[in-house]
Image (tube, grey):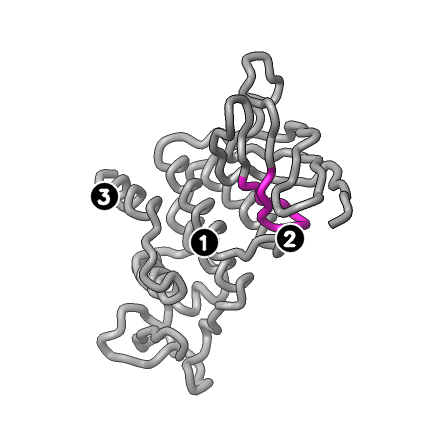
Amino acid sequence: MAESAVYLQPAFILQHRPYRETSQLLEVYTRDFGIVSVLAKGVRKEKSRLAGVLLPFTLLQLSYLDKSELKTLTQAEFVRAYSLQRLALYCGFYLNELLQRFLYRNDPHPELFAGYQSSLEELLAGLHIEQTLRYFELALLEACGYGLELDVEHNRRRIDSRRRYRFEANAGLFEDAEGYVSGASLLRLSAKAPLIGAALPESKQLLRAMLDGHLQGRPLQSRDVLAKMLKYL
């Protein structure tokens, strides 16, 4: 594979881990190239100027050599830090884990990248945190081709705000008097409207069912931690 270079690519660090004595392996979410693995040589040295820059929830402009599956970092410029704290921080790690689980490597989704950045801004503001998570989950599923038409049933009949529904993986929405989500909540989700009242817990149950259908039993570590935190708030 011929060596090429990528210059000043907008990116976020999803995960980092030590590599050998002074380097780091980075899982990087880029705007135009999707998730890529990048080797940052020497950044763990005491005098490295990048040690405090290559962190999660920091918008960067990265340059790297692209000659194999493992890229080599050549430059990193700081753009903005999203200094998430407490609950918002764990929510951020949850978003990162979702991206790593659902996106194929080297598969760009510029609109989802923008949605991720917007979600970090909302988490930083500390408002409507659970709503932020639900709409990011929905955007992720849609970007991966797992989206669901939330305003129609499996048989193309329009959702009725006065009725209740259940979701079945690989089938869609079915009217069910004992269903866990109301038509009103589905229509709010479809319209990207504020999730108020019962729409918030119902949307959470629906999105969890949709996500779990594609996770195929593989647990999300950050979800368990997040659930415990929400329980005591």
Q: Mark 1 or 2, which is nearer the eye? A: 1
User: With 194 as the anchor, is 230 left or right in this view?
Assistant: left
Question: How many numbered marks appear?
Answer: 3
- Label 1 amino acid? Arg
Callout 1: SS: helix
Q: Is residue 109 visible?
A: no
Question: Residue 101: which numbered mark, if any?
Answer: 1
- Please report whichever mark, 1 or 3, sits nearer to the chain's N-terminal start: 1
98 over 59 or under it: above or below: below
- Please report whichever mark, 1 or 2, sits nearer to the chain's N-terminal start: 1
Position in image of residue 14 (x %, y %):
51, 40
Q: Return the residue at label 2.
A: 110
Q: Return the residue at label 3.
A: 231
Within-10-Å neighbours for mark 3: few <14, some 14–19, many 20+? few
* Magenta region, residue range: 27-38
**Residue 30 magenta-highlighted:** yes
Callout 3: SS: helix
Question: Residue 191: which numbered mark, if any?
Answer: none
User: Is there a contact, CB below 8 Å, between mark 1 and mark 3?
Assistant: no
- Please report whichever mark, 3 or 2, sits nearer to the chain's N-terminal start: 2
User: With 136 as the anchor, is 71 left or right in this view?
Assistant: right
64 over 199 or under it: above or below: above
Q: Mark 1 or 3, which is nearer the eye? A: 1
- Label 2 amino acid? Pro
83 over 49 or under it: above or below: below
- Label 3 amino acid? Lys
Distance Cα–Cα, label 3 vs label 2: 34 Å
Residue positioned 34% across, 73% down in the render:
167
